[in-house]
Amino acid sequence: MALPAKLQDVVDLFATFDDQADRTNLLLSYADKYREVPPEVATRPFGSGHLVPHCESEAYVWALKQPDGTLKLHFAVENPSGISVKALAAILEGTLSGLPAAEIAEVNPELVESIFRHNISMGKGMGLMSLVQAVRSLARAAS
């Protein structure tokens, strides 16, 4: 699975932690980096066209094309307990924003398994993979 360099670095970082508590702490640190979509991009109530299907935490995603042709990603997570999706949103925003749309469109949703391993429920895993798929879809549309 080829990933953009910054995203691969994050996946590699998670791979160095075998201890579940350490992985959880790392996820929590990413969740703390989550920043909600700024009001100049979107305000509540968010449009259903940006809603991530199958996400238990009611996540939304936006991809704004920049003048240089790259994308800037923004997320909203309506469930205050949605730590996993907030962590993934922060990871995706921090590693994919600023890349060309075509490169973002190629990111494989299976990266969720590399980051979260098998320590999430099937439903949560589907929601997280849907978040990646939503980002890919927006990137394809922007290409």
Image (cartoon, helix red, strand yellow):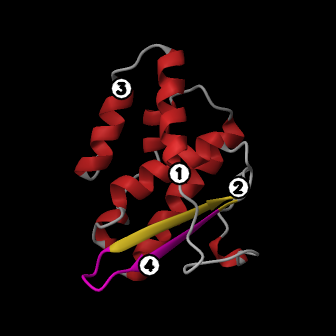
Read off the magenta span.
60-70
Disc 1 versus disc 4: nearer the observer: 1
> Percent position (x, y) of residue 8?
29, 43
Residue 57 versus residue 113: which sits nearer the camera? 57
Q: Residues within 10 Å of mark 4 (few under 14, many from 20)?
A: some
Q: CA distance from mark 1 to mark 2?
A: 20 Å
Residue 31 versus residue 111: which sits nearer the camera? 31
Q: CA distance from mark 1 to mark 4?
A: 18 Å
Which SS class for mark 2? loop
Q: Residues within 10 Å of mark 3 (few under 14, many from 20)?
A: some
N-term mark: 2 or 4: 2
Q: Which residue is mark 1?
A: 34
N-term mark: 1 or 3: 3
Which SS class for mark 4? strand
N-term mark: 1 or 2: 1
Q: Is residue 18 left or right of residue 62?
A: left
Q: Which residue is mark 2?
A: 54
Quadrant in which the C terminus is drawn = bottom left
User: Which residue corresponds to the image point at 50% horizontal and 28% vertical from the top-left?
Assistant: 117
Q: Residues within 10 Å of mark 2 (few under 14, many from 20)?
A: some
- Residue 68 sits inside the magenta stretch: yes
Which SS class for mark 3? helix
